[in-house]
Image (cartoon, rainbow, N blue to C red):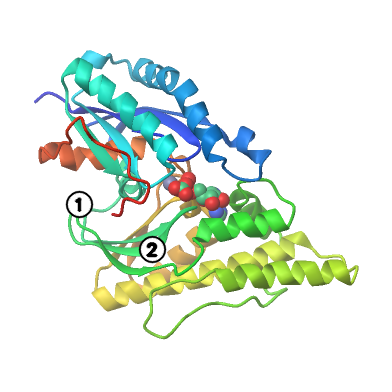
Amino acid sequence: GKPVVILGIETSCDETSAAVIRDGKEILSNVIASQIEIHKRFGGVVPEVASRKHVESISGVVEEALEQAGVTLDDLSAVAVTYGPGLVGALLTGVAFAKGLCWSKGIPLIGVQHIAGHIYANFLSGGMEPPLIALVVSGGHTEIVHMPAHGEFSFLGRTRDDAAGEAYDKVARSMGLDYPGGPLIDRLAQEGNPEAYLFPRAWIDEESMDFSFSGLKSAVINTLHNAEQRGEEIVQADIAASFQASVVDVLVEKTVRAVNKTGVRNVVVAGGVAANKGLRARLTERAGQEGFHVHFPTLDLCTDNAAMIAAAAFPLYAEGKFHDLDLNAIASLSL
Ligand code: KG4
Ligand code: ZN
């Protein structure tokens, strides 16, 4: 039959992105306009600035995505857009733009939950079919999700305080590194000694699949402060490696718990921290030892992008699950 061509739009945080995906899996284009250089100056994302930049960029980014894909608006089967969670002003830019396109072309609108999008990034690179365990690790979320079928999610565990990416960014900031700090700490960690410092690991209790990173964050910040007060030199690579070892240890072992508890032996990893080299190596190693499968998105699809949003919309399109044109952005939309 006719191919299903979905335009995806993502504006939940600091990337304005548009992508065209054919039949749920084939990326025809994935354009990402990053605002990182702007937000770096402030050490984090400034919501008002983000909204204004999305408004400035969105139509150019969508045009470029269509052009690179070699399609026109008339070729589109549907438009998919992130409608939460995220910064409400930022989300609204994408939602309003998507609604306008759907109204003018008379095509279906599909609202996508951002975290579902991150999970579906796996399907763009030969990921596995449900039932799945998804380890979600982004700047705003850290969760272990059981996904028995497409579109069905239940939580096995979640963070009780900071998200993993947030802990990376805060620790990086205290080390004087730029925003976002995750990739920089990851790079430094490759050259450091992960046993130089013994930072805490919050297991919570033997059964729990919940996370807590605020104690770890404080421990790193205290170590830095104490060293500064005593006039001691610290080796940044050792701090980075020891911090990363603590984060990765807990993420990986709780994922192993989820596999053993549910008997679901296919694991996908989702969100910006899925790009982390230490996490990829250790989880792959443990999967080999424990005899389960693990899949990571390609590096460019770990952080925010519209290709994953269009991919997540594909099964919804197939089931005719569309939204009305009164779709609203929801800052705290859950899976
Ligand atoms: O999923 P994402 O692009 O945005 C959210 O939805 O939050 O994730 C961004 C987060 C940031 O906190 C960033 O520091 C982190 O992902 N991140 C990493 C790496 N690459 C991005 N954290 C650790 N290691 C990385 N290589
Ligand atoms: Zn994200």
Position of residue 99 measured from the top left corner of the image (x, y, whole percent)? 26, 26
Front residue of 76/50: it is: 50
Q: Which residue in the structure is indicated by mark 1? A: 151
* Amino acid type, residue under disc 2 in the picture: Glu
Mark 1 vs mark 2: which is more N-terminal?
A: 2
Q: Is residue 84 above or below residue 185?
A: above
What secondary structure is found at the residue carrying circle 2?
A: strand
The residue positioned 73% from the left and 71% from the top of the image is 222
Residue found at the very far right of the displayed protein: 231
The residue positioned 64% from the left and 75% from the top of the image is 199
Q: Quadrant of residue 196?
A: bottom right
Question: Quick check: can you spot residue 70?
Answer: yes
Question: Quick check: can you spot residue 190?
Answer: no
Q: Which residue in the structure is indicated by mark 2? A: 143
Q: Which mark is residue 68?
A: none
> How much space separates mark 1 and mark 2, taking CA atoms?
16 Å
Position of residue 221 measured from the top left corner of the image (x, y, whole percent)? 70, 67
Position of residue 156 measured from the top left corner of the image (x, y, whole percent)? 31, 70
Q: Where, quadrant-wise, is the N terminus in this rendering?
A: top left
